[in-house]
Amino acid sequence: MRTQVVIIGSGPAGLLLGQLLTDAGIDNVILERVTKDYVLSRIRAGVLEEGMCDMLDEAGAGRRMHAEGLPHDGFDLAFDGQRHRIDLHGLTGGKRVMVYGQTEVTHDLMDRREATGGVTVYEAADVMPHDFDGEHPYVTYRKDGVETRIDCDFIAGCDGYHGVSRKSAPEALLKTYERVYPFGWLGVIAEVPPVNHELIYANHPRGFALCSMRSNTRSRYYVQVSLEEKVEDWADDRFWDEIRRRLPEEAAQKMTTGPSIEKSIAPLRSFVAEPLRFGRLFLVGDAGHIVPPTGAKGLNLAASDVRYLFHGLRDHYQEKSTAGIDGYSERALRRIWKAERFSWWMTSLMHKFHDAGDFGQKIQEAELDYLVHSRAASMSLAENYVGLPY
Ligand code: FAD
Ligand code: DHB
C-alpha cells in the first residue's frame, strides 16, 4: 500500500491534520491503536482558542461547535473568599474562547473524515515507523493478525505522550525537558447546571478547584488531589463537599450537586521534546509536549502544531517548497515554550504546594491581588489565555 502521509494516532491532532490534508488533495491514512468508541470515550479538554475554532471551520468540522458550543468572554479567579472577573473580551480587544468538549471536537472530525472518504485503520497493533531518516519511509502495523506495510513520503506522529513516534526517534538526537508536579486533578462530570455562567479558577489553602462546564445543563468540575489518592475513595458526596469548601461561600451555596457520570484522576506534567522533526517523521501535539491543564492549552497547542505542519506539507506538494517543513520544529517550539511557560505559571499560582507553607499561600494571594487589580497584569493573563498569535 502507498499514501503520501501516514498519520499515527486519531486524536484531535491526527484527525485535524488528516482533514486539512484531505481537503488539500493530499492522500493520507490514519492508524489508530484503539477502537473508535474508545477514542470517543475519553473525556479531556474543554476550552478552545479562536485559532483552533478557525481551524475546525477550515476543516469543515465547525458547524456543531458554533451551534452548541458556548462562547465565553471572561472567567473568574477566586481567592481569599472573593471572586474577581477577568474580562477576556475587554482586555484583548474583542477575543473570546469557546467552551466545547474535546470529545465533541473528535466526534465532528471523525464524522467529517467519514463523509469525505478519509481512511482510518482502527485497532492497528504494533504500529512502527521505519526509515524516516531517508527518502523512502514506511510504516508497518498488524490488524486481525495480518501485517501491513504502507510506503509514504512523510510520517506525522500524532500519537500522544505514550505513543510510538517519539520513542522511535534516535535517542542521541532527542532532548527532553520535564517537570512532574506533586499532585493531580480529580475531575467529575455531572448532569447539573454549572455554578456560574463562566469558569471559576479557585486558589484555596486546601488546594485548587476549577468549575467548568460542557453545556448549560452539564458541569465539569475539578479539584487538586495528592498523587496517592484513589478515585474509588472519592464518593460523589466527598467530592461535592471538597469542591464547595474551596469556593467562596456565595458560590458554594449556589452549587447544584448530583450523581457523577464520569470521575477520574489525571497527573500534572510539563514536558517538551526537542526537536519535533527527525528526517521525514514529525512529532505533533502531545507526542511532542505536555502542559499541565491549568491554562487550558494542551488541545490548543496540538492545533497550532497541526497548522504549521499542514502549511509545510501543503507548500511541499503544491509549491515544491521545503521551507515550511524545514522550519516546522523551530516555529512550533517557539509557540509551545510560551504556552509551557503560561501553563507552568498558572499552575504555580493556583495550586497548593505543601513545601511552600503559609508563606507560599500568602505570596500567591498577593500575586492574585496584583493580577486582578493591575490592568497590565490582567492583560497579560488574558492575552495568553485566549491564545497567542500563530
Ligand atoms: P491524543 O488526544 O492523546 O491522541 C493520540 C492518539 O494516538 C490516541 O487516540 C491514541 O489512542 C493514539 N495512539 C497512541 N499510541 C499509538 C500507537 N502506538 N499507534 C497508534 N495510535 C496510537 N487539556 C486541556 O486543555 N484541558 C484538560 O482538562 C485536559 N485534560 C486531560 C486529561 C488527560 C487524562 C489527558 C491524557 C490529557 C488532558 N488534556 C487536557 C490534554 C489534551 O487532552 C491533549 O493535549 C490533547 O488530547 C492532545 O491531542 P493529541 O491528538 O496530540 O493526542
Ligand atoms: C477545562 C479544563 C481545563 O484544563 C481548563 O483549564 C478549563 C476547562 C474543562 O475540562 O472544561
Image (cartoon, rainbow, N blue to C red):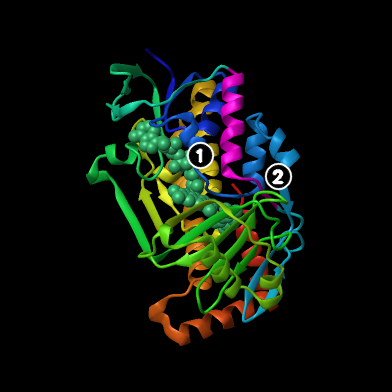
* Residue at the spot of label 2: 69
Front residue of this view, candidates 243 and 150:
243
**Magenta residue check for 279:** no
Q: Residue furthest top?
A: 1
Q: Give the residue at x 32% y 18%.
A: 144
On the image, the x and y values in percent for residue 248 come to 65, 76
Looking at the rendered structure, the secondary structure element under dot 1 is helix
Corner quadrant of residue 212: bottom right
Circle nearer the N terminus (1, 2): 1
Residue of label 1: 41
Question: Could you tell me which residue is drawn at 27 percent across and 44 percent down?
Answer: 173
Q: Nearer the viewer, residue 124 or 229?
A: 229
Position in image of residue 53 (x %, y %): 66, 41
Which amino acid lies under the numbered mark 1 shown in the image of this protein? Ser
Q: Amino acid at mark 2?
A: Gly
258 horizontally vs 330: left or right: right
Q: CA distance from mark 1 to mark 2?
A: 19 Å
Does the beta carbon of the residue at mark 2 sit less than 8 Å from ligand 2?
no
Q: Quadrant of the N terminus?
A: top left
Report ligand 1 position as a quadrant.
top left
In this view of the protein, which residue sits in the foreground, 301 or 335? 301
* Callouts 1 and 2 close, C-beta under 8 Å: no
Q: At which x and y percent is residue 135?
A: 32, 22
